[in-house]
Image (cartoon, rainbow, N blue to C red):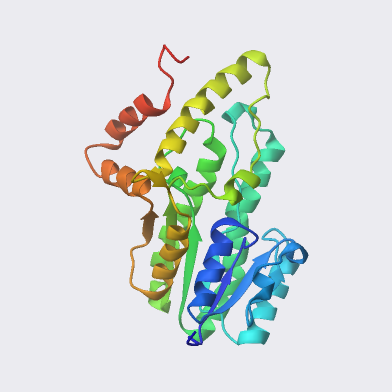
Amino acid sequence: MQKVNKTILITGCSSGFGKLAAKTFWDRGWNVVATMRTPEKETELTQLEGLLVTRLDVMDLESIRQAVDAAMERFDSIDVLVNNAGYGGHALFEQMSDDGIRRMFDTNVFGVMNMTRAVLPVMRRQKEGIIINVTSMAGMMGLPTVSIYASTKFAVEGLSEAMALEYRPLNISVKTVVPGAYPTTQFHENTDDNLNAGGEELASFAKNLYAQLAVLAQSMSVQGGKEADPQEVADKIYECATTETPVRNPVGADAEMFVEKMSRGSRQEFFNNLAGVVLPTEETS
């Protein structure tokens, strides 16, 4: 393994895309700061020589400061920040509690902002840096039972696009990696489902919508006759960190397909076609 002498800090490394990205960069000689809320539970990344595992909760400003300080003390730079920590959930808009909505925005949006604000001064002093925000296809198209999750990811997409313009003159790139449907344990573990809220009639309607969406997600996660490999997302993050790529980077056959369809005709036409796929027919309702 040849040493690269570049440092990457990744949030949400306890599982899923974050852990895969940490191992991918470490395998290729990078200094890696793998952060998570409960590092004492981590047994795999801690075995990798030279990889720093440290506590970080994106809603705990002191833990962010400590993690950034630890990264700088150990490696003396943060060349790439990957904002990967986040969670999803399934419910109709009116089934989500006020606390649930705020909690999801706190993690998925304000957590990204907290991390980015902590690292930007480092990158400005270095006169270079790359920020990669892991979003979702739900940040490009709204889907039933993920209205709050989608709105958080739309927010991060907008933030990233604006920041990409703001910080380009300072030699700091801002990009998003936009995964399609992947069977990561991270997504299934970090969820907040409220499909039973609101009474029997509303819950039955919500579950019917979710069942239709689940069928679509399952079919989308099978690409070329086999289950989609989450390593593709880690590889896309690596590509964004090491080469010139666009601001928005979809990954997965389904994500690429939807982006291509969005480019045809009007947004309303795409929306109407999407409704025909994700909403139950009379036979299934």
Q: Is residue 49 left or right of residue 139?
A: right
Residue at (67%, 60%) from the top-left corner?
A: 58
| Position of residue 72 measured from the top left corner of the image (x, y, whole percent) | 64, 83
All told, the count of numbered labels is: 0
Q: Along the line of sight, which residue is nearer the eye, 198 or 171?
A: 198
Q: Along the line of sight, which residue is nearer the eye, 121 or 129?
A: 129
Residue at (57%, 23%) from the top-left corner?
A: 207
Residue at (50%, 70%) from the top-left corner?
A: 24
Give the image quarter of residue 9. bottom right
| Position of residue 243 measured from the top left corner of the image (x, y, whole percent) | 35, 74
Residue at (40%, 16%) from the top-left corner?
A: 281
Q: Along the line of sight, which residue is nearer the eye, 204 or 96?
A: 204
| Residue projecting furthest to the front | 225
| Residue projecting furthest to the right | 40
| Position of residue 246 measured from the top left corner of the image (x, y, whole percent) | 33, 63
Residue 135 visible? The answer is yes
| 217 relative to 157, above or below | above
| 93 relative to 40, above or below | above
Q: Is residue 30 left or right of residue 278?
A: right
| 56 relative to 259, above or below | below
| Residue projecting furthest to the left | 265
Residue 83 visible? The answer is no
| Position of residue 26 measured from the top left corner of the image (x, y, whole percent) | 54, 76
Q: Is residue 89 left or right of residue 211?
A: right
